[in-house]
Amino acid sequence: MMEKNISITKYQLFFFMIQSQTGLGLLSLPNVVQKTAKGDGWISTLIAGVAVQIMLVIYWQLLKRFPNLIYTEITQKILGRFLGKFLNLFIYLNFIFVGGLATILFIKIINLWLLPITPGWIISILILTACIYLTISDLRMIARFFVLATSLILLLLFTSFLSWFTPKEIQYILPIGSSGFKNILLGTNNSLLAMLGFEGLLFLFPFIIDNKKGVLKTISMANIFIATFYTFFVFLTLISFSSDQLAQMREPILNLLRGITYIMVDRVDLIFLSIWIVPMSTSIIAYLFLASKSMNVDKKNYPKVVLLNGFIIFSITLIPHNDAIITLFNKYVTYLSYAVVFIIPTLLLILSFLFKKHESSESA
Amino acid sequence: MSFFKKKSSLSSTSNDGGQLCEDIEKNIRMLEEHFCHTEDLMKKELQFHNRKCVIIYLDSLVKKELLQASIIEPILEGKMSEIEKTVHAAEIKKTSIISEAGKNLLDRSCVILLEKDPQAYVASVGGIEERAIQEPNNERSIKSSHDGFIESFSSNLQLLRKRLKSPQLKVKYFTIGNFSNTKVGMLYLENLANKELVEEVERRLSSIEIDQLYSTGELEEVIEDHPFSPFPQILATERPDRAVSYITEGKITIIVDGNPRVLVVPITFFAFYQAPDDYNSRWLVGSFFRLIRVFSFIIAISLPAIYIAIVSFHSEVLPIGILYSIRVSLEYVPFPPLAEAIAMQIILELLKEASIRLPSPIAQTIGIVGGLVIGTAVVDAHIVSNMMIVVIGFTAIASFVAPINEMGTSARLLGFPTMLAASLFGFFGIVFVLMLIFMHLSKLDSFGTPYFSPLAPFKKEDVKDSLIRLPLWKLNTRPTDAKPEYANQQGRIRAWKKK
Amino acid sequence: MRIIFIIILCILPILLTGCWDQHLLVNRTLVNGISFDVTEEGKINGSVRALSIQSKGGGQFDIYDELVSAERPTPVGLALDIDSRIAGEIDTSKAFVVIIGEELAKKGIHPFIEIFYRNMNSYMSSKIIISKGKATEILSVEKEKSPIAFVILQLLNGTEADMVIPKETTFTVWKKMLDPGEDMILPYVERVESNKVEVAGVALVNDDQYTGITLSREKSSILMLLMDQLSKKNRMALTMGSEGKGRAISFATRDLRRNLEVLVDKDNKITCKIDVKMNVEVGSYTQDLSKRLNIKKLNKDLSDELTKQAKEITDILLQANCDALGIGRRISSFHPELWKKINWNEEYQNVQFEPNVKVNIIKTGNVF
């Protein structure tokens, strides 16, 4: 049985998923998507939402068979101790690297927009201190904070409505479908990366206290929310900027807000980015949490593991921040993520069907 | 450490468990020894039906007239044969243990010893001067009742019982402190308060090992969950109406004898921003003021920091009009904004501290000297900019808004790290510190209740009477943060509307 | 105890190393206007107007502007030169106006806009204007009195509200410069009476180059109508009939409906139909006092006059090769095959404009 104090409600699961998915990806998403899909980028994000939904169903099938085990325990159960542990190493590395990458991108954005000269390691220490401080406590408290932080996403929605006062041109996305199916799919590929974070379900499932029947509905709602949210923003930027201009920008969403002026405040982008620090941190917290959970340690050693992982992520952020290295790092992490998030769970599901394995069955 | 332990155990065990015997002289001697031959221990020898009878009392603790009228005179008259019936006292206890008798002597009673009787009769003849019940100074209200707790345990209990005339209101006594023997009582509604909560509070109260306990503040520090947190996790109030409203939510109040402040556990963050007046105003007004107060918390923590961040990092967020006037007011100010802000904050704290201790006519002078003279002179001398004075003044006012003083002070204190972070990292620093504070708030627990509830964890049904106040007829269920045994608190409250 | 020690060890270096990015407002010199010109030797002359504060004593300050300029072969690095000539750190985050000289604008304004959008600190809502003659002359107007931002900015805001010039900021200029399907028009200002600045109309820009053709204030208001831009109030004065004996009328547009249709026939000939319907309120009209106002006739006269003028304006647009109405983008979104085939810059010349304005008077003020 799971202890009472690390369980979360379905409701909190919803917010956990949202918080771990939104964050860094969003700011540069329109640029990334339009590289291939041009004006049809918003279709790409919608398709990405569908793809994530399919994955969620696969996860659901897998987790129904092992309701009390987390991802890294399921691998061992199905593949045996040795092979399972070998896979778990990759799973762990994935979360650490994705967490590291997220932190690097975070630092880059802060360095670009808010603090140009402040050395990256200082920002890294600050972010990770905050992240470790929360991750070290139990899941229940993380979930509480995530629910609290979601109010900031509503704030973003509000800010985006303000941006309707800048000139918009719906014709930029016309004619629909002009970029061709292949390019739209390539755009989907890019936007899937921004949607990563839903794999957290594989680790959270055993800790849900309510009736597990409605979980699929909850996570689908979360996915629909995220997909709509992303599509909305991609759409908004696509109609605000011409594609040549969009290709030049690193963070289109921030540029969108840069043009807004009010009698009380200028530079809404800076204020927005300052607030957006919180959702960006929650993504890192989620990865730090998942990395620590994937090591299958008992409760006593958990704080030590979190500290260790935090330190590893800090070391990753010390690598030089030039565009070429980050792109390379990004590429390899992407491959690893595809394996861990999409391929392994699917394989596990197929294997568990083939060998008719359930939680109760003896491990081979 | 060990030295202390030895000492304290000595004091509590001396002469313990000594039994009274039939020899009255020996009994007196034993009692005198128990009190270390203190000179205010008075003995009066009388004759009662030809038996020697000694009345012992502590001179300082009893009312002489009462002693004369209800004890001495009846004994001298000797109408009845038994001493218990003779003495005019509300209750007469019998004991044969020295320490027990000693305890009662300390509790404003007198002890009557009879020849050839191994029992001591204890009768209460106490009378200590008490302050009259008046409105608490630091929790004033406009529209609510104007009585407040005082230093006497029984009066405080009376104030609560007066409002809750229910047999379910239960009191449990504890005696804490080996020297002070302070009487501490916990009050709750038996059928409403959560059993686990009651057990937990009992466990914490009964496990305290301390020699002296004088104030609620000390007790608070002893039983709270997170002693390093800057936030108060137990609410101390001087208002009986406030305490009663928490009791009816299933919470537990703790009264410490000799203290006008009563503790309430468990408590949430938002309780510190509620005032009894909210319920006596129209609900829209009440909700508005609650939101204003919570807003004041954010202001008190972050306003000076935001100002510092703007003038030293991100001046571009200001539109040109304000920017120019700030730029002009900063000209010739030689200090960095952080130094300005901290200096002003400290001046403000000094003024506040100075005016608290002084008698009120002088305190007013301090206010004038501080507010007018220092305020304008400092600006004229180009030491602090005009805008900074505005910011600090606004912050101070915001921090004084909190109905419970401790929270306002905490908020002001948290302003310092925020200012420091702002001067190092601008907006990023502010968000970093605020994020840490809110993480901390979501991690805090007060007696098993999430401290930042109902926002973290979010409870829809509790928002109606915490962040805002909905009309009374909407509040059908009581707040669930103390996990009361049942939630329903009213039926169809506006039943007259339906015929 | 040890943990606290470690924490202090971690915090101390952060505090000791100081604040990298701190640049105090008190050390910054706020620039509120920038101008670019080309000199006779072909160098770029950049000038800024910066805020300068002087104490009058007793906590009172005087603020006025000082003008600093520098020259370089390219716009890059001008900021460095100017910074070294100005007290304190130069801060362009509140540069409200960027004035570009006529001659320089003909060579292309892109390099001067790029400086602003690449830099995170600069202001994206500053007004970009083209000046008649040297831009420095506009910038140096009344420099002892008040910051230029308040002079020119209010002037521009006023004319924007009157719908004489479009609301163009760095942000929108950046977008239109890079958009092949649309060209922009920029405010055109000149210095009059030695010490006053006047909005003379709009300058037509092709891609990022000023074409040398301008529209007068009256004409630019009509262009605004064709571009479907209406702010709260839009006043316009018009003389109908031939000059001299014509009737003058001023009116305010209350409601504007524009329908722009781009038709492509089989021979890929592009026709652009612009239908404008507007409800107006008569401001002043010196009518023949003996007769009642014939609204129907007036409607027709006004419509004819405006249609005629609109046609003139579209001809000027073609002449200047300035696609201010965004015809190109329409073609790219509705006729993508055609768009890929043609070179829009040349093809634009062949577009046939058919403007049609219909006026409907809804209010005549206090009198009939």
Image (cartoon, coloured by chain):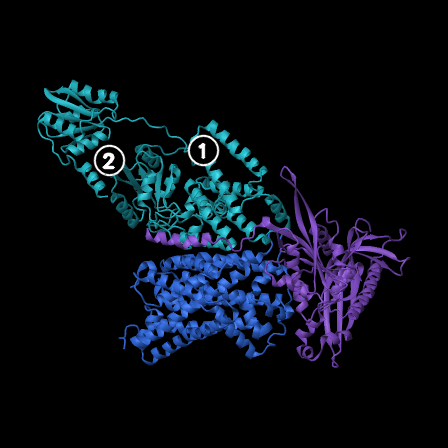
Task: Give the color of chain A as drawn.
Answer: blue
Give the left or right position of residue C169, taking residue B38 as reference: right
Answer with the quarter of the image where residue C55 lies.
Answer: top right
Q: Residue at x 25, y 25 (%)?
A: B60
Query: Identity of the amino acid at label 2?
Result: Phe
Residue position marked by numbered label 1 in the rendering? B354
Instruction: Tell me, for residue B60, which label it has, or none.
Output: none
Residue position marked by numbered label 2 in the rendering? B179
Task: Give the color of chain B as drawn.
Answer: cyan
In the rendered image of this protein, does residue C241 appear above or below residue C341? above
Query: Identity of the amino acid at label 1?
Result: Ala
In the rendered image of this protein, does residue C351 appear above or below residue B342? below
Q: Mark 2 lies on which chain?
A: B
How many numbered badges does the structure rendering display? 2
Label 2 crowd (10 A; few <14 / some 14-19 / many >=20): few
Instruction: Give the label, 2 or 1, closer to the camera.
Output: 1
**Are dots 2 and 1 on a single chain?**
yes
Nearer the observer, C121 or A280: C121
Nearer the observer, B242 or C70: C70
Label 1 crowd (10 A; few <14 / some 14-19 / many >=20): some
Q: Position of residue A53 (x, y in %)?
A: 46, 72
Task: Give the color of chain C as drawn.
Answer: purple
